[in-house]
Image: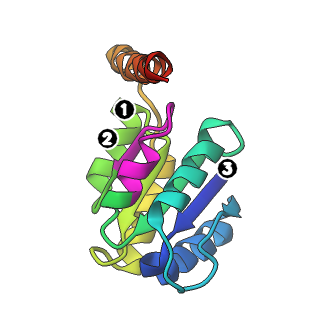
Amino acid sequence: MKIAIGSDHAAFALKEAVRIHLIESGHDVKDMGAYTPERTDYPVYGEKVARYVVSGQADFGVVICGTGAGMSISANKVPGARCVLASEPYTAVLSRRHNDANLLAMGARVIGEGLACMIVDQFLDAEFEGGRHADRVALITKLDENRESQTNILS
């Protein structure tokens, strides 16, 4: 599976640990930065990873910042991104099964390395169930389309 990963400075160390774990698990990993623990801005990396995933260049994305909240918010601004913030496996798994989440956000100041790797593994192993959930994902997609048309109207 091709996975895009990104972080800000606060999550650089956890991103590196998760990146190595994914590679050792046999995944093709595209590191989209940050590449050092120097101060940086999380929206840059949330957007970059989300656009890469939505464009089809990666199957899934993992974004990590201090709490995961900023990355999740930033990634979800990209139409087609369905980024879930998860601090435990249950939310990660159900977001894949029910919401067809294509990005996972985590907080380096919230969870440790072992739990982060467990969450990522279970997120990637879970499959979208479709059915009634597909109807709901279609409604989410329609929100993206409405947002784009509203932006065009206001431009």
Question: Disc 3 residue type?
Answer: Met
SS type, badge 3: loop
Q: Give the range drawn in magenta.
A: 71-84
Question: Residue 129 appears in which quarter of the rendering?
Answer: top left
Q: Is residue 115 in view from this perspective?
A: yes
Question: Residue 69 appears in which quarter of the rendering?
Answer: bottom left
Residues at badges 3 and 1 in contact (C-beta under 8 Å)? no
Query: Which disc is residue 99 wearing?
Result: 1
Percent position (x, y) of residue 96? 41, 39
Q: Is residue 25 magenta?
A: no
Percent position (x, y) of residue 44? 54, 59
Farthest residue toward the front? Answer: 155
Question: Disc 1 residue type?
Answer: Asn
Residue located at (47% from left, 68% from top) = 41
CA separation, marks 1 and 2? 7 Å
SS type, badge 2: helix
The residue identified by callout 3 is 1
Residues at badges 1 and 2 in contact (C-beta under 8 Å)? yes
Query: Which disc is residue 94 wearing?
Result: 2
Percent position (x, y) of residue 87? 28, 62
Of marks 1 and 2, which one's residue comes earlier in the chain? 2
Q: Nearer the viewer, mark 1 or mark 2?
A: 1
State whether residue 86 is above or below residue 97.
below
State whether residue 6 is above or below residue 14.
above
Percent position (x, y) of residue 148? 48, 22
Query: Which disc is residue 31 wearing?
Result: none
Give the left or right position of residue 155, taking residue 92 as reference. Answer: right
